[in-house]
Image: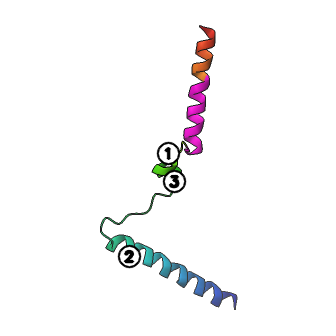
Amino acid sequence: MILKLLLITIVLMAAITALFAIRILVQKGGKFPNTHIGGNRDMAKRGIYCANTQHKMASKDKRSILKNTLN
């Protein structure tokens, strides 16, 4: 029973993967969609960035504040 269920699951997953691959290959200019926050223009317009970018921005701001207070 478990083996049959496992085989059905593997076949279904393989079929779904193949359909996605065919869609990307056949579609003109087909490529995987960019689902990362950094690739979303609307999020960038609103000032929302990925965690790494926000960390870099915060670190840069802290350094500039520290420089200004020491001078």
Tell me if mark 2 has few (under 14), some (14-19) or many (20+) residues whose alpha carbon lies within 10 angstroms of its own: few
Q: Quadrant of residue 2?
A: bottom right
What's the residue at 56%, 34% (across, down)? 56
Tag 3 secondary structure: loop
Mark 3: amino acid? His
Specify the principal SS of the magenta part: helix
Mark 2: amino acid? Ile
Mark 2 or mark 1: which comes first in sequence?
2
Q: Which residues are magenta?
A: 48-62
Mark 1: amino acid? Ala
Q: Which residue is mark 3?
A: 36
Q: CA distance from mark 2 to mark 3?
A: 23 Å
Mark 2 or mark 3: which comes first in sequence?
2
Q: Residue furthest left?
A: 28
Tell me if mark 3 has few (under 14), some (14-19) or many (20+) residues whose alpha carbon lies within 10 angstroms of its own: few
Pointers 3 and 1 in contact (C-beta within 8 Å): no
Q: Considering depth in this image, is 67 or 45 the residue closer to the camera? A: 45
Q: Which residue is mark 2?
A: 22
For the residues carrying marks 3 and 1, which lies nearer the camera in this image? 1
Tag 2 secondary structure: helix
Q: Quadrant of the C terminus?
A: top right
What's the residue at 48%, 75% (across, down)? 17
Note whether 9 is above or below 69 in the view shown: below
Residue 40 location (% of width, % of height): 48, 52
Q: Considering depth in this image, is 31 or 46 the residue closer to the camera? A: 46
Q: Residue furthest top?
A: 71
